[in-house]
Image (cartoon, grey):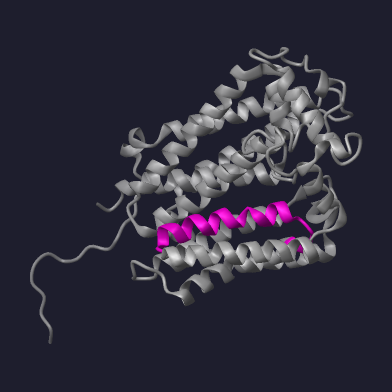
Amino acid sequence: MRSFSGPIPQPRVDRWPLGQLAGLDWAILISSLLLSGIGLATIHSASSELAVDYLPRQALWVLVGTVVLVVLVSIDYNVLVDLSLPLYVLGCLLLLGVLWIGAIHGGARSWIGFGSVGFQPSELTKLATALLLARYLAGINARVLSFGQILATVAIVAVPMALISLQPDLGTAAMFVPMVAGMLLVGGVPIRIWVIAVVLFGLLAGGVWTFGMKDYQRERVRTFLEPASDPLGAGYQVRQSKIAVGSGQLAGRGYGQGTQSQLRFLPARHTDFVFAVLAEEWGFLGVLVTLGLYAVFIVNGARIAMRARDREGILLVVGLLSVITFHVLYNTAMVVGLVPITGIPLPFLSYGGSFTLLNFAATGLILGVDVRRYVNR
């Protein structure tokens, strides 16, 4: 019989590190709550002339999102990573189901309705995909990924992207690209693979333009290249957005005093173009404060990734942070006409229940990775 010497091994216990809350990255939590507060105020102003004031609804989603954040901080992210495959399958099944039973909003069948409440399965699938990618890439014991492992990673992302593109919602589908790119960068991809990826992306973009985009989507791109060609049609939205941003000047017109939003010139002003309302009412100073809060969130998120206790935590934070960062970059560039208009909202500011819950859930997972670096050391 085999004998043992020394102390008896103790079972692994993963305790909630209450004594380490002082070490939590409070900058991310505070910046996300401040951004949500700015979003609530801006949504209230933007919807004051609409039939529905969206402030109470968004306030409820922020409250629910805060609860979700606290719950996810309390749960060991490794447990969620272990559950990533069933969550991923569930998300893909919901995306498949929404093609038949989903409600149409904005030309896309991307919502599942429950009475007056709508739910976008694509947002849940973003989280599930990030968790599954973290599980898969963390399990590879190599500094550089093989070509087959890269293809497997891309395949994990390609399934939800294809299902979302069929809705069609190309803007949401495109948000999976920064996720997989960031996680592959951390996972270890040779430079030659990145060169091949750029070439393939160009070919794919040409194929999407020819076969995957509808006429109105192509028109958005043409309008981006030459907005003056259709100022009252496809170019109207970006033109009004640029007017709103420019008219804010240094200190803005004042809360609730923006002409583009209050006189209903600016479409989608409480969702995709909420940043234009903010810029018109609070000017360059308000924009500077808001972008500063985003910078605090992103920089501290990167620090959390660098000090995470394991590879799964690093990959998970990088994937989620890449999605949020790209949302911020694209939306702010969109409202000033630097990129084509698409349905990409602004994190924490834009109205929307599913997207708000995604932002808070991602923040909770990122903070959970930070807290767990103190556990079992």
Which quadrant of the structure image shows residue 310?
A: bottom left
Q: Residue at x 52, y 49 (%)?
A: 322
Mark yes or no: residue 91 visible.
no
**Is residue 33 shown left or right of residue 100?**
left
Q: State left or right for residue 7 relative to residue 86.
A: left
Residue extending farthest to the bottom is 1
Q: Is residue 169 magenta?
A: yes
Q: Which residues are magenta?
A: 165-188
Please say if 31 is above or below 368.
above
Give percent across and percent down for residue 182: 49, 55
Indicate whether 329 appears above or below 219: above
Q: Nearer the viewer, residue 31 or 179?
A: 179
At 61% from the left and 31% from the top, the residue drawn is 36
Q: Nearer the viewer, residue 311 or 326?
A: 326
Height in image: 223 above or below 1? above
In the foreground, 223 or 347: 223
Q: Magenta span: helix, strand or loop, mainly?
A: helix
Which quarter of the figure has residue 44?
top right
Q: Position of residue 58 (x, y in %)?
A: 71, 34
Toward the right, the furthest residue is 232
Q: State the residue at coordinates (81%, 31%).
A: 239
User: Relative to 232, is 159 on the left or the right?
Assistant: left
Residue 212 visible in the picture:
yes
Q: Quadrant of the N terminus?
A: bottom left
- Percent position of residue 367, x then y: 44, 43
Query: Is residue 289 found inside the magenta-colored segment of the image?
Result: no
Q: Position of residue 139 (x, y in %)?
A: 39, 69
The number of numbered discs placed on residues in the rendered structure image is 0
Q: Is residue 40 left or right of residue 32?
A: right
Tell me if residue 91 comes above or below residue 344 in the rendering.
below
